[in-house]
């Protein structure tokens, strides 16, 4: 076999056209404005092959989508969260929504907003004294986010709680939960306000983003217009310290003014020093 | 009035037209969530068989959402064009499907018919149609609109350049706009979803996009997709606004949840018209819709989500919009569960809009908690391209880094043009050639760093 091949080589050099793909020059076109890519997280200057994306970009996108999908479907490790949050010095309580599994959770948002019968019974059995704040740690649409962000956020927020002297109910760790589940939990825990820490709908570039929803006087039937939201809490977004400061500011206002929602505007930025929150004043 | 259909030993009863329509709808999660979907596959087909025999005229006398309490129903009934309807007034829904697919129903015939077609009629006939029917009939419908260019001509497809940025950073937004223009996108609109709702930020974005359009004399229009009342406010402050945007839905109550009614839309349109910024035409409105928006506002009146979506096009129609698009997979899997449901809904929405004479585009998209991926989007955009979709979105790399969902990309529209031979709006096509971005065949040319847009980028994005 080797002999005929070696005989073909000289024939090519003698004028037989080379592979037209190679002969035609560059088949992968890099965009000459790639330096602009540094000023936006958007996927610009990707280059192209014909009208399509180069292989490297197709694979980079596929990986990001896979990570976002996994963030939605990864099982929520409620027990691990309870252990880590207890280690910060909080009492904890494990609860579940009425959605029995992830598929039902995604199809039936209403189930994720209600407690399971068993969890409701747990809350009814407990004799909870009145508190300023209830904290709900909810998987939401990204277990990845809550696993990564909830504990460091609570570690930062603990200093703000101590600073203000707020009395806090046991931290409820809720599986297959949506934001409105906090209304029922907060009411049962006899809290003036509830904050729900929840995994946000994962984006391609942000599978691990945490959202914080604060609701004054929680009770079933509250609407989103009655909440304040702090979004995009993650390494590349709002830091845990910044988010804890914002939440403390909003909670202080909510307890003083007896409301949350559209009529409570977040003006905590006015208190930042060089863009950073002042440290909690303790003792 | 109850409806009844017999299949062998089984008699299916449907309490009213609303229930019949819902149960005749191809299965989707949103109708299941609302509790209005057919309970079995057979019931679904029985409902379709029953619906096929309902006279079209019934939709003019039996309202699905009460006339007395819903201004959208009143709009539909009170502005119905009886003379346009006359040629099909004797048909039932099944006949209507056959007629639409026949050679008798040419583009001219369908255009004349459009003012006589109510959204409920369009939705009803779509429920009897397979995907290929939805494509074949929509392809015959042509809706042409104009502002600074001509959108919707046969053989063309436009693209909205969507340069969203998580913090509205002007340099970052500019970078995405330049990337899109250099990929030949932006003839439908350069339209940004702002992260902020503050008036100074919105005004800055409007001036930024307008500045690029003016500087390079681009035959296109700008839009910042904010609430209609906010656009009216910035117009009053003297900020350049080309198109006024608003999300709309198919019931008065759902629109109220968006903070609008028909009167507010009229005010917004009049404010935009008063600026007289269009050079070729005065289509100044841009609307977005999507199946499930009424249910999510608890304002669905027991009507299926696809029919309510068609009613949103009836809301759009009298405002003579430049652009209307369904954001088909954005709302999530509780309304459209997977790629199959998203694809079906995209084709239905496009068909219903076009049949009603509305310039329908589609945000071919999905979220990461839906059972869908890029392959499903490739399928839907290719089908919509074949169906003559007015425009699709162009987002860098399909990844909207502000809204956290995936739509079609600058590359995707190149693929569609190549595979289906689709051109851009002619004025924009000519501009791209004059700028050396595309050649005479409409294909992209390879750019060096000295292209005027890139030279300008150094200061614009500084």
Image (cartoon, coloured by chain):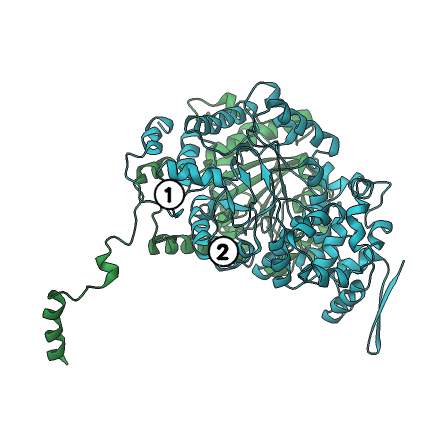
Could you tell me which chain the residue with mark 2 belongs to?
A: A
Tag 1 and tag 2, C-beta contact below 8 Å: no
Q: Which chain appears cyan?
A: B
Residue at the spot of label 1 = B438
- Whether residue A155 is visible, yes or no, is no
In the image, B416 versus B252, the foreground residue is B416
Q: Position of residue A68 (x, y in %)?
A: 48, 52
Look at 54% across and 51% down and name the residue there.
B364
Q: B364 left or right of B114?
A: left
- Foreground of the two, B294 or A80: B294
As drawn, the label of residue A69 is: 2
For this view, does A183 lie left or right of residue B426? right
Extreme-bottom residue of the structure:
A1
Q: Residues within 10 Å of mark 2 (few under 14, many from 20)?
A: many
* Label 1 CA crowd tier, 10 Å (few <14, some 14–19, many 20+): many
Which hue belongs to chain A? green
Seen in the image, is A258 located left or right of residue A50?
Answer: right
């Amino acid at each position: 076999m080797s002999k005929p091949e070696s005989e073909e080589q000289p024939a090519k050099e003698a004028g037989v056209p080379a592979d037209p793909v190679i002969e035609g020059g560059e088949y992968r076109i890099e965009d000459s404005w790639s330096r602009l890519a540094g000023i936006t997280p958007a996927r610009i200057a990707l280059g192209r092959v014909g009208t399509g994306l180069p292989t490297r970009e197709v694979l980079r996108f596929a990986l990001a989508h896979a990570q976002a999908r996994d963030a939605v479907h990864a099982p929520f490790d409620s027990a691990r969260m309870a252990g880590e949050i207890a280690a910060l010095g909080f009492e904890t309580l494990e609860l579940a929504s009425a959605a029995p599994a992830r598929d039902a959770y995604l199809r039936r948002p209403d189930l994720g907003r209600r407690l399971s019968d068993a969890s409701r019974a747990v809350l009814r059995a407990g004799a909870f004294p009145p508190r300023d704040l209830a904290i709900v740690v909810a998987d939401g649409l990204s277990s990845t986010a809550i696993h990564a962000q909830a504990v460091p956020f609570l570690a930062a927020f603990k200093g703000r709680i101590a600073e203000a002297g707020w009395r806090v109910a046991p931290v409820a760790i809720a599986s297959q939960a949506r934001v409105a589940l906090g209304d029922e939990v907060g009411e049962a825990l006899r809290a003036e306000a509830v904050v729900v820490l929840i995994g946000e709908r994962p984006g391609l570039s942000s599978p691990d983003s945490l959202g914080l929803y604060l609701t004054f006087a929680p009770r079933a039937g509250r609407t989103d217009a009655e909440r304040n939201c702090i979004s995009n809490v993650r390494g590349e977004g709002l830091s845990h310290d910044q988010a804890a400061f914002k939440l403390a500011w909003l909670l202080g206002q909510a307890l003083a003014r007896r409301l949350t929602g559209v009529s409570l505007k977040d003006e905590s930025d006015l208190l930042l020093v060089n863009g950073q929150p002042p440290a909690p004043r303790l003792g | 009035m109850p409806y009844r259909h017999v299949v062998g030993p089984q008699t299916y009863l449907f309490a009213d037209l609303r229930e019949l329509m819902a149960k005749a709808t191809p299965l989707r999660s949103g109708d299941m969530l609302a509790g209005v979907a057919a309970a079995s596959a057979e019931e679904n087909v029985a409902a379709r068989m029953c619906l096929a025999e309902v006279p079209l005229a019934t939709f003019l006398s039996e309202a699905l959402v009460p006339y007395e309490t819903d201004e959208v129903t009143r709009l539909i009934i009170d502005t119905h064009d009886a003379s346009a309807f006359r040629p099909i007034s004797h048909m039932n829904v099944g006949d209507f499907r056959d007629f639409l697919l026949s050679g008798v129903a040419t583009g001219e015939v369908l255009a004349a018919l459009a003012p006589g077609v109510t959204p409920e009629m369009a939705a009803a006939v779509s429920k009897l149609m397979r995907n290929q029917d939805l494509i074949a009939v929509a392809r015959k419908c042509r809706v042409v609109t104009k502002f600074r260019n001509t959108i919707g001509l046969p053989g063309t497809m436009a693209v909205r350049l969507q340069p969203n940025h998580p913090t509205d950073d002007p340099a970052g937004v500019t970078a995405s706009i330049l990337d899109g223009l250099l990929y030949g996108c932006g003839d439908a609109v350069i339209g940004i979803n702002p992260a902020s709702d503050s008036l100074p930020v919105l005004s800055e974005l409007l001036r930024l996009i307008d500045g690029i359009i003016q500087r390079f004399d681009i035959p296109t229009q700008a839009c910042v997709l904010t609430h209609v009342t906010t656009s009216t406010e910035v117009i009053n402050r003297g900020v350049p606004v080309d198109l006024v945007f608003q999300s709309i839905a198919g019931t008065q109550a759902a629109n109220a949840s968006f903070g609008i009614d028909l009167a507010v839309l009229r005010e917004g349109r009049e404010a935009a018209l008063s600026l007289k910024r269009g050079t070729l035409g005065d289509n100044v409105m841009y609307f977005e819709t999507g199946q499930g928006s009424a249910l999510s506002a608890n304002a669905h009146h027991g009507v299926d989500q696809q029919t309510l979506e068609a009613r949103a096009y009836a809301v759009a129609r009298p405002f003579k919009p430049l652009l209307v698009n369904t954001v088909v997979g954005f709302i999530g899997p509780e309304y459209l569960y997977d790629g199959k449901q998203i694809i079906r809904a995209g084709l239905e929405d496009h068909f219903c809009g076009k049949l009603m004479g509305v310039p329908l585009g589609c945000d071919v998209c999905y979220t990461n908690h839906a059972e869908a991926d890029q392959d499903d989007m490739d399928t839907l955009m290719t089908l919509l391209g074949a169906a003559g979709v007015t425009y699709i979105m162009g987002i860098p790399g399909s990844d909207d880094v502000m809204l956290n969902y995936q739509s079609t990309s600058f590359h995707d529209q190149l693929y569609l043009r190549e595979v289906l031979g689709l051109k851009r709006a002619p004025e924009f096509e000519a501009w791209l050639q004059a700028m050396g971005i595309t050649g005479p065949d409409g294909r992209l040319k390879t750019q060096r760093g000295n292209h005027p847009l890139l030279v300008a980028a150094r200061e614009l994005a500084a």
